[in-house]
Image (cartoon, rainbow, N blue to C red):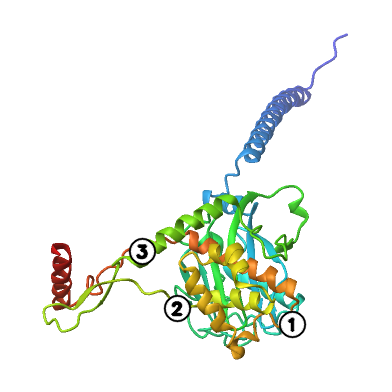
Amino acid sequence: MVTPVDDNDTAAAAVGAVSNAAAAVAVEATSEARAAVATAATATTTAGAATVASDAVVPAAVSNEDAADNSNNTKVCRFLISNLQGGRGYAKNDFRIDLLQSKHGLYDIAETVFDIMDKEKLTNDMIYSHLWDMTFNKKVYKNGWRRQTMPDSGEWTQPASETDIDEGEPRLFSGLNTPLEKGQKGKFGGESASFEYVLESITDMSAAQKDKTYPHVSKVANQISTKVEDDWLTPSQKSQCIKLQEMWGKFYSGNNSWKRAKRSPDRAFTRAKPSAPQWGDELQIMGLLINADCKFKKCWTNIMQYAFVDRTESACSMRWYQLKKEDYRLKWYGKGKSAAEKISLAKRLAKSTMKVQLERKPKRERHPYANADEAVLREYAERDLAYENGY
């Protein structure tokens, strides 16, 4: 028996078949799309991993300048502070201060030293109590010539000049005109304090140094004896000082300077022997030794001849015995210290003076008018030099 077929059922079946086929195609297309998305996601993940790996080596967002700053953060600058003197006298020791190259500056050295003086009871003054100058690498900076409008306001009465140094302009090491180099030195001078400092080293931060707080201060053991001996300098320094003594002796005995010409209308100056410089730091060294009841001859042989290379023994002897009569001056040298402490301090100061002297050499003085702005004065210089050369 044949079952009759309704036209409507046939149409419905046809429509259903078409719908099922379309659905199958749609599902297949959706699967392909999902596969494409999965592939894209995999590619994105791979690319991201590659980017992370690349960034781990060289961060693309960090400039060369930033990289340099980050590198400086790991550089430790070590300064030796010597001959520290406050209102209550000299410190018994020298000190080392460790600072970070990119974070700290010259002002941080001064601020740290004032903290040291407070702990050592060398002064009651604050860093801003008096004006002071700070020399580094032959450039002079000055503090106290501008003020904050209000305490801790960060606002100043005027912009910082090329020579100002203060809390607002600390003269960061990373911003100095001349890059830091081992051996660069300077001085601090003011009514509150004075000291000398030298850059001993610039090193990468070690693992042990990472746990330290900066500025980091450490004392330097004082190894100078309290005897009037020449044990405070090396054999090489001794020989250099002896050679310099001879050089200065020849310099002062020759016509290496100028003096005003007398009764000579055609000349302004004539050649002359140089005059010895004024007595300065030498008096303090002498005074300490005198107050320690030391004898001149022994002090000259073991200390003064190496520190005062531009002075003769006879000149020092005369000044020594003259100083013994100057009670108003002599009583302040080493006040409150024992004889041993006075001798040790005298040798420390002598060592510092000697180092300065080793950097100096006698040099024939130029004519006073050689660089004059006025043409008439330069003509005098030319005539004087012509006469001296012809003579």
Which residue corresponds to the image point at 21% horizontal and 76% vertical from the top-left?
269
- Which residue in the structure is indicated by mark 2? 278
Residue 198 to residue 26: above or below = below
3 or 1: tag closer to the N-terminus: 3
Could you tell me residue 81's position as x and y percent?
A: 64, 65
Q: What residue type is labelled 3?
A: Phe
Could you tell me residue 118's position as x and y percent?
A: 73, 78
2 or 1: tag closer to the N-terminus: 2
Crowd band around label 2 with a 10 angstrom C-alpha radius: few (<14), some (14–19), many (20+): few
- Which residue in the structure is indicated by mark 1? 336
**Residue 112 visible in the picture:** no
> 3 or 186, which lies in front?
186
**Distance Cα–Cα, label 3 vs label 1:** 40 Å
Disc assigned to residue 197: none
Q: In which quarter of the image is the N terminus?
A: top right
Disc assigned to residue 251: 3
Secondary-structure class at tag 1: loop
**Distance Cα–Cα, label 2 vs label 1:** 28 Å
Secondary-structure class at tag 2: loop
Secondary-structure class at tag 3: helix
Q: Which amino acid does label 1 sit on?
A: Gly
Q: What residue type is labelled 2?
A: Gln
Could you tell me residue 72's position as x and y percent?
A: 60, 53
Mark in the foreground, 2 or 3: 3
Could you tell me residue 239's position as x and y percent?
A: 52, 52
> 51 or 164, which lies in front?
164
Which residue corresponds to the image point at 19% horizontal and 83% vertical from the top-left?
262
The count of marks equals: 3
